[in-house]
Amino acid sequence: MTDVLLETRDLALAYGAFRAVDGVSLRIARGSIHTVIGPNGAGKTSLFHCLTGERRPTAGRILLDGREITREPPHGRVGLGMSRSFQVTSLFQELSVHENLRLAAQGIDGWRALNFWQRLNKRREHLARADEILERIGLAERAGVAAGELSHGQQRILEVGMAICPRPKLLLLDEPTSGMGIDDIPSMTSLIGELGEDHSILLIEHNMSIVMSISDTITVMNRGQVLVEGDPETVRSDARVRDAYLGEAA
Amino acid sequence: MTTKTLDTVAASPGRRRFKGRLGAGTTLAMLAVMVLLPLVLPSATLATEILIFAMAALACNLLLGFTGLLSFGQAIFFGAGAYISALAMIHLNAGLIGALLIAVVSGCVLALGVGMLCIRRKGIYFVMLTLALTQMAYFLAYTLSDWTGGDNGLLDVPRPPLAVGETTLISFASPLAFYALVASLFALIYVVARRITDSPFGSTLLAIRENEQRASALGYDTRLFKIMVFVLSGGITALAGALYGMLLNFVPLSNIELLMSEQILIMTIIGGTGSLFGSLLGAGAIVLLGDLLSSIWPRWMLLLGVALIAVVIFMRGGLWGGLSSLLERRRGSHTKPHKEAGHD
Ligand SMILES: Nc1ncnc2c1ncn2[C@@H]1O[C@H](COP(=O)(O)OP(=O)(O)OP(=O)(O)O)[C@@H](O)[C@H]1O
Ligand SMILES: [Mg+2]
């Protein structure tokens, strides 16, 4: 049996009477890149909201490392080893790129971040972590610039960079390439590929060339449910998957 | 509500050095202002009033400028601080330190309650809750006229000396002595607030102001941070209220009115949100303007409206923003103009 990092059991999320997530059971293996794909409105982001605690599922359970986290608030999940990026870029626009990353690193301090008497440069590990991630995502040149002044592509990279600052066990990335220009996508693809070497990743992505090239496992969602699950080859050749996407196009 | 006034680029080495100099500079400037105020102004009482409102504006700035919380509730804490300290002195014979401590503690406790209630909602609903609570506090003070004097205000508020047992160490009967007391307290609060805004806690407040959802996703319990900054702000505001009662020897009902909240907010915004030194500038400007104009033109508040509009439209960083960009330009800095307004 594979080593399961995150597991959901019959997870459901309803908006009123509409079931956006309808009985999803996932098992994400430790060390893998696990991608969720599906046509628009399939419920991918809604599933994500449940996993990150943004929304409380209407039914089902979520287990991280065998521990029940279904009702854990978003901020509590960071300390447990989960960290996320947003589909719609969500930065601290007026703060510098470096400060965005430093704040991201400081988040694991939990209630210790309430310390109101310490000087920031006393927390060297957070400054060092921000510097390290700056290098890794290739934004060291722009460290002092306000995040809001970065190009869209750079903002998307920073978005992912912030998610890795707390050294998560599980990295959740919601469409990291969304809205990126064709020129910027290769750098994001290689970044995610690299991150996959030392992180377990749950990825939502529309860009099929990325999905097929870096995923270990793919889950195809449609209408809130899991349609097919398997390795890229299996999914590529599955007739139901083609139908779901063709159905969307029609 | 976010503003363009905060230091967005503190991380670049050059900026950090400049910011450090500017920071130390504003502390010195603040101390210089403390010494000069009673000398240049016609009366020490006027100088004292400026510092009391600067204290209240600074506290308001922690909410508005640093956390992005637009609260109309500051009059609750200002008024409560004034009433409760005065009542403690009148009925319980509290001394100076006792009265001020009671004010601070009750301000903190009230702010804890108000904060916990209001931060359950965001945006416009948060603002409405603070408005509603201020109205309630006002009517409560109005109704409890046996205690508060209602419309007539609470009269004969003493200004006790600093004493140990029966021996008086320092009397604050003279306006200048009382000014020295208020100035010392203001300087203390200013330095402490500077330290707090530069701490992990303070940096997290900025994160919440910028993007609360992201802050929460990064592991911060944002509600806890917002409640804590409310408590801090409430305590400081109540202290200002208590000192105001001692200054006037009287607590007018207007201390706990919505209009008081508005005045404190206007001082904060005109001075510059996100700048502690700006709060001193804002309070100074408004108190002086009021003092100059109220005697010659009863409708002077109209001008206040014009000033506020001018600041909001033309000078987003307020007085501090204008001043610091002037300073920075004179130093020949190469950073872009709209980022020059750093928080001190
Ligand atoms: N807050 C909400 N209230 C009501 N319905 C919602 C809400 N959010 C999403 N939905 C609906 O739930 C369904 C699933 O939405 P979701 O955002 O999870 O899809 P998705 O798979 O992420 O799509 P996309 O690929 O476009 O990002 C959609 O039909 C959407 O209209
Ligand atoms: Mg989505």
Image: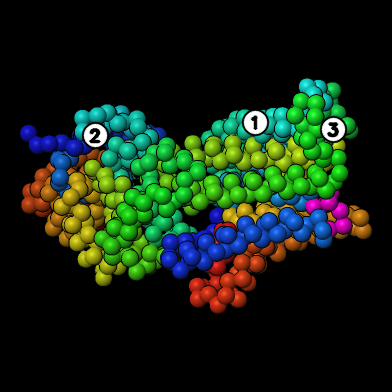
Q: Quadrant of residue A169?
A: top left
Name the quarter where the C terminus of chain A is drawn: bottom left
Q: Is residue B243 left or right of residue A247?
A: right
Is label 3 or label 2 in front? 3
Label 3 lies in what chain?
A: B
Q: CA distance from mark 1 to mark 3?
A: 19 Å
Residue B5 in the magenta stretch? The answer is: no
Q: Is residue A44 left or right of residue B124?
A: left
Residue where numbered disc 2 is placed = A64
Tell me the residue at 49%/65% (across/down): B17
- Is there any visible trace of residue A248 in the rendered image? no
> In the image, is residue A219 above or below residue B342?
above
In the depicted view, which residue is nearer to us: B203 or A192? Answer: B203
Mark 3: give few (<14), some (14-19) or many (20+) Cα within 10 Å.
Answer: many
Q: Amino acid at mark 2?
A: Leu
Q: Amino acid at mark 1?
A: Val
Residue where numbered disc 1 is placed = B105
Q: CA distance from mark 3 to mark 2?
A: 61 Å
- Is there any visible trace of residue B195 in the rendered image? yes
